Image: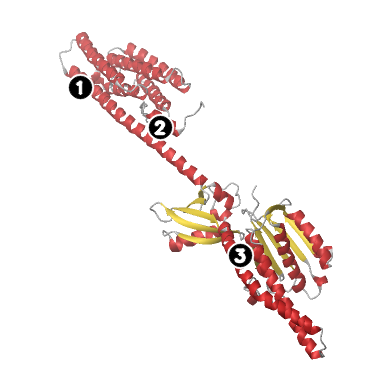
Amino acid sequence: MSGARTPLEESTLGHKHIAPFFLHDDPWNLLRLYHVYRLALAGLLLLSVVTNHNAIKLGTYDPYLFSWLGTIYLIVAIISNLSSYFEWPDLPIQGVVYVVFDIAILLGLLYSSGGVNVGLGVLLVIPVLIPYLCLPGHYSILLAAVTGICLISMELVLASDLQKTDSSSLTHSGILAGFILLASWLGNRWIHKASEMASLAQRRGVDLANLSQLNQSILDRLESGIVVVEHTGVIRHMNAAAWDLLGNPGNWRSKPLSVFAPELNHHLQHWLEKISPRPASFDIRHQHTTELRARFTQMGSHARQTTLISIEDTSEQREKLQGVKLASLGQLTASIAHEIRNPLGAISHAAQLMGESRLDAADKRLLQIIQSNAKRMNITIESVLNLSRKKHPKRERLVLKPWLNEFLRDFLIQSQLQREQISLFIEPADTTIEFDPAHLHQVMWNLCRNALKYAHDTPSKLHLDIQGGTPTHTRDVMLNIIDNGRGIPEDLRQRLFEPFFTTSTKGTGLGLFMSRELCLSNGASLEYVALPTGGSCFRIIFSRAHR
């Protein structure tokens, strides 16, 4: 596929050819800077002649030639600035043609001023070094040698024309020619070394880019969420798994972590202040819904600079533990059923036979107590058995709002409540979950039935408010079942989901326990939320259905 090369391709090509070294990313900029220097130099030389401010005796040998050369130099300098702006002709052509022209003009200016003693000879060093920008190698050394020869030849011609006997000018020109050659040779060596270092730096940069791409590819493919946070709390990187666990935050780049995950940021600050640089793990309830485990690790040798946060969803591990627990419960309940139900059946049968006999009122009352408690014990055993039998939920994709409407229609009929006593609000309306429909029906029935039994003494005063949806910056679905009852005392809240705990003499104490276990087996959770306005709120947190 044609187009731009990848860093790996550039790395391969970099070993075949060492590109010219440039002091700037764009060599045209240096050439433009040189053209500006030429324009300023030509303007100053011509201005010194026009205004007669000639402190260094310019153009003393041939003023007419000096004026013409200065004018031509200024015109060409203007043209060269325009040609470098439009980048035409090519860089090597401009770098050679204009430099040769400059050397010829400067030699002419020196000749018209009487030789190197005027002090302009040092200006020849700069144009000799310019070709290194576009044609590094022996071109500049050759140009420097030719310039030195021309410089000495010019002095010989002047000495012959002026019939000079003093050899100081010739010596001066020789020293200047040698200096030009030395500067060109040193420039060539420096450019060569710099080109090698630039090529090495380029290859190292490509290697680093390849390594960075490889690291990012590995991070993006990890099943664990990875978040890299600066010491300022700003997110530097987040892989796809972390993006999904944190609820698909929108424009997260260069944004503070506290905006999307305040609980995670709270534990990060605690780790930075109390534990860093030692790694540490925390269990976090993200946005009060998703249960996560976060591990904080310092990156680099400087404390509090960059932190690597590894995030894992604990729901899968929780489901596995729940499966093991239900399997153990199934074995236990099977043993209980075998050891208790046979004698319990014998007791119930004996009580029925005794009921057929003639008994006085006191004996009948005792017999009734035996039968009612035997029946209650049998119900308890059946409830535990039903729970253990449902350890393998059959999850289905359920659109929550239509399913709840159907459930509430049946619940209203069987509970003899009015439609206005229950309100339902789900946002967005197409919120979808994955749950066993039979399990969800049992959970909702237990929660709504408890509200009917315990919220008010009079069912007509009950009002249920069922609210659901997806909170901001989380991937899970929340469903609240809120009643307007008397609420649950604080000292009893910790025991709500314990098996066999009940405040009713007729209950088994397994309703809420079974509801929570059914939620856990479906990858969800059930909890009680205290309301400051009174009443009770039971919250189910579902994992979002996979698309």
**Foreground pick, 442 / 108:** 442
Of callouts 1 and 3, the N-terminal one: 1
Which label sits in the foreground, 2 or 1?
Answer: 2
Name the residue located 76 percent from the left edge and 82 percent from the top edge: 351
**Residues under numbered marks 2 and 1 in contact, where contact means CB atoms less than 8 Å apart:** no
Residue 185 located left or right of residue 80: left
Quadrant position of residue 465: bottom right
Q: Is residue 9 above or below residue 543?
A: above
Per the image, the residue denoted by label 3 is 326
Residue 404 in sight: yes
Q: Secondary structure at mark 2?
A: helix
Which label sits in the foreground, 1 or 3?
Answer: 3
Of callouts 3 and 2, the N-terminal one: 2
- C-alpha gap between disc 1 and disc 3: 99 Å
User: Which kind of residue does numbered mark 3 sit on?
Assistant: Leu
Q: Residues within 10 Å of mark 1 (few under 14, many from 20)?
A: some
Per the image, the residue denoted by label 1 is 175
Quadrant position of residue 448: bottom right
**Foreground pick, 152 / 40:** 152
- Any mark on residue 11, and which? 2
Q: Residues within 10 Å of mark 3 (few under 14, many from 20)?
A: many
**Foreground pick, 8 / 446:** 446
Residue 459 located left or right of residue 334: right
Name the residue located 48 percent from the left edge and 44 percent from the top edge: 218
Residue 214 x/y as whole percent: 46, 41
**Foreground pick, 434 / 153:** 434
Q: Is residue 119 above or below residue 361?
A: above
Name the residue located 62 percent from the left edge and 58 percent from the top edge: 523
Quadrant position of residue 123: top left
Residue 121 x/y as whole percent: 27, 21
